[in-house]
Amino acid sequence: MAPGRINLSVAEARELAESALRGVGFDDGEARIIADHVVDAALCGYEYSGLAKILNILESEHFKLPRRPIKVLRETDVSVAFDGGNNVGMLSLFYASEATIKKAAAHGIALVSVTDAWMSGRSAYYVEMIANAGLVAIHTAASSRLVAPLGGVRRCSARIQ
């Protein structure tokens, strides 16, 4: 074991995560969903998306703003658009993935979107949820303008004077 590292069992990591999340205001179900996500990320080798991600949640400016219940904005038999209610994406996208599974299982296809959510964690987690239900998934994500597009770090046109 590397100096300064702590090894936890999966059960210990999950309990620590759930306890910390409950301590900052998440209910039992929300804490379980987020804890499952970060523990899974750590088990997949993504340490930065593991238990340490809980600290990122707490440090986020979004966390300081009020949360609202996740609600449906529009829905058809094969689609649903959710307002994530300023909830951490690990919650919003979990519920969106459940809706995707339900609609795709019933109708053969589904298109689900989420807005007003932040920090969704490891994107493959949601694709794996859907794949484990025997379905095929395509997941896309958007971010703020803090991320430069491909080629965006160099000037693409002449300087106008």
Image: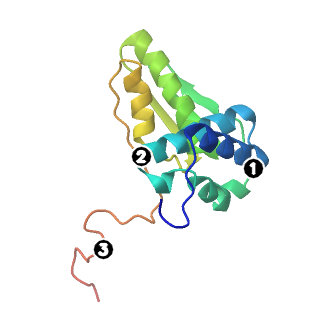
Residue at which label 2 appears: 141
Q: Is label 2 in a helix, a strand or a loop?
A: loop
Q: Position of residue 12 (x, y in %)?
A: 63, 42
Which sits earlier in the primary sequence, circle 1 or circle 3?
1
Q: Amino acid at mark 1?
A: Pro
Residue on which disc 3 sits: 153
Image location of residue 95, percent across then percent down: 57, 30
The residue singled out by tag 1 in the image is 66
x then y, percent, for residue 130:
41, 25
Looking at numbered disc 2 in the image, what kind of residue is underneath it?
A: Ala
The residue drawn where x is 25% and y is 84% is 159
Residue at position x 46%, y 20% from top?
A: 101
Residue at the location (22% across, 76% down)?
157
Identity of the residue furthest to the front in this view: 1
Spatial CA distance of label 1 from label 3 is 35 Å
Residue type for callout 3:
Val
Residue 81 is at least partly visible in this image: no
Q: Are marks 2 and 3 in contact (CB under 8 Å)?
A: no
Q: Is residue 21 left or right of residue 127?
A: right
Question: Mark 1 or mark 2, which is nearer the start of the sequence?
Answer: 1
Q: How many marks?
A: 3
Question: How far apart are the two marked residues, 2 and 3, measured between alpha carbons?
Answer: 21 Å
Q: Dot 2, crowdedness within 10 Å: few (<14), some or many (≥20)?
A: few
Ranked by sequence position, the earlier of labels 2 and 3 is 2
Task: State the residue at coordinates (52%, 46%).
Answer: 120
Disc 3 element: loop
Q: Nearer the viewer, residue 120 or 44?
A: 44
Badge 1, how many Cα within 10 Å: few under 14, some, many 20+? few
Question: Farthest residue in the bottom direction?
Answer: 161
x and y percent of residue 160 in the render?
27, 84
Within 10 Å of disc 3 (Cα), the crowding (few <14, some 14-19, many 20+) is few
